[in-house]
Amino acid sequence: KDYKTTILFLSIILTLFCCKNDKILKKESSVNLPEKPNIVIIYADDLGYGEIGAYGATELETPNMDVLANGGLRFTNGYASSATCTPSRYALLTGVYPWRNKNAKILPGSASLIIDTAQNTIPKILKSKGYATGIIGKWHLGLGAGEIDWNQHISPGPNEVGFDYSNILAATQDRVPTVYIKNGEVVNLDPNDPIEVSYEKNFEGEPTGLDNPEMLKMKWHHGHNNSIVNGIPRIGFMKGGEAAKWVDEDMADYFLADAQAYVKTNKNRPFFLYYALQQPHVPRTPHPRFVGKSGMGPRGDVIVEADWVIGAFMKTLEEVGLLENTLIIFSSDNGPVVNDGYYDEAVEKLGNHKPAGVLRGGKYSLFEAGTRVPFITYWKGVIAPGVSDAMVSQLDLFSSLANLVDSDESSLDSQDLLGVLMGKSKDGRDKLVMEATSRTAFRKGDWAMIPPYKGAVRNVLVDIELGNDSVYQLYNLKEDIGQQKNLAHSNPEKLEEMIQEYRAIIDH
Ligand code: NG6
Ligand code: CA
């Protein structure tokens, strides 16, 4: 009997040893990294390529973003998946190109959830590996399935697609309902003052930006003339929910406090935090302590505010001793826009600041500035500071983070670029389809190709070139990063090759 027990004991030891070895081997064959670091994605809203000191901004000071950029890996060819918010965020979480989902376009605050609850997502993968998963900030991926009753538990939402904690604004700061929603419940809702929301018509007797200009502290330039909340006219109509309405100027502090609490609560287990800042999207409402700090009006001031928020958040990570054990990814959901619908002095006070840096276009555009954004990976003591010119897309976070936590999950369009994100490899993407308001363009190597599109060449309201033209456009980004010289005519072979490869992806 003793003999049998010994054999059993030995075989258990042997199995354990092999498993362990297997794991070591697997790690070594990929990138040798500590297991289960915390992962934080800090995601700005409409922050452009040229908006950060480390990316060449000279008129704005962003010391804390610079700490990330200069102490981490700063990508010069990092892309959001779309030139607007919803599609970018959809792709970020699912690893699927947004143009594959016809619902992935700028959503009203009343839209249904556009991520299938059966679909795989970054937080689902991380959760399956034992991570706490949280989202704090802007959601904009729809809620519920059909008409939403804001006075009941709201589901499905972030908590049904992988997050076990959520504290969000439903859509955008300029869209109703202007309330925070925590784990499916409107925060501070008074049941005696129920919330009603409509994107079709106003509620009788409620003031609007269109009819009641005397009530406005910020005037609308285009759109944004429906319900008035805190003196700011919004998109969409809302009634009730007085006690639940957010104070715009306090939003940055509100989300920061929650993000800091999240870190502290989860400090003893691996966590994933998707911290989705609302700045510098409209309406730009800096807390009074940031007013006037940039000399550029509210748009600059909220960038200074966002920068401060990042510094305060990092400090918390440091205080709880987690900075060396946390991978931080910083990026933006789309390129910059100066006038996005309010008179907020953004145009008048811009001065020499170039939100898109050297790039052409901006938010909504198929030109580079639509999707090429600040993109930084930071992990103290693990990622060596540097600059990478490798092409990476936010799409790739899905497979790369899966690799990081030893998961085999992959998705249709996401490439595992963990080595690139860690600075161990320069082999980024070779090809990428860019998207802007349901149109697509293509980048391969140094080349960008924009197919012909009908529609305005420039959106005159926001003053941005959209990339539309009646002919094909072909640019060599290495020689002409500002996309000034269309080479489609002079380089028909390259154009043909680009068209073929582009079609092969989008028709797939
Ligand atoms: C547009 C809004 C713009 C902004 C954008 C969404 C108007 C005229 N313009 O429709 O202000 O809210 O949607 O921005 O309403 S995003 O960053 O969330 O995609
Ligand atoms: Ca955005």
Image (cartoon, rainbow, N blue to C red):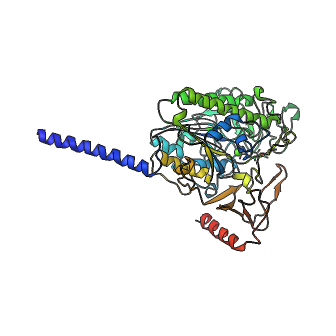
Residue 243, above or below 386: above
Instruction: Pick whichever, 364 or 309, lies toward us.
Output: 309
For the C terminus, the quadrant is bottom right
Q: Nearer the viewer, residue 101 or 19?
A: 19
Q: Quadrant of ligand 2?
A: top right
Closer to the camera, 119 or 419? 419
Q: How many marks?
A: 0
Q: Position of residue 218 (x, y in %)?
A: 83, 34
As displayed, is residue 291 above or below residue 447?
above
From the viewer's perspective, is residue 342 above or below residue 252? below
Q: Is residue 151 visible?
A: no
Instruction: Tell me residue 267's x, y (percent).
Output: 50, 29
Q: Based on the displayed image, in which of its 4 quarters is residue 433 positioned? A: bottom right
Would you say 233 lies left or right of 118 here? right
Up-down: is 203 above or below 91?
above
If the image is split into quadrants, where does the N terminus sit? Answer: top left
Q: Position of residue 344 (x, y in %)?
A: 83, 37
Instruction: Residue 215: name its quadrant.
Output: top right
The answer to which image quadrant residue 490 occupies is bottom right
Residue 253 on image: x %, y %: 68, 28
| Residue shown at the point (88%, 32%) measured from the top left | 214
At x 77% / y 72%, what residue is drawn?
A: 489
Residue 57 visible (yes or no) = yes
Q: Residue at x 35, y 49 (%)?
A: 22
431 displayed left or right of 473: left
Which residue extends farthest bottom?
493
Q: Identify the residue shown where x is 49% and y is 48%.
A: 402
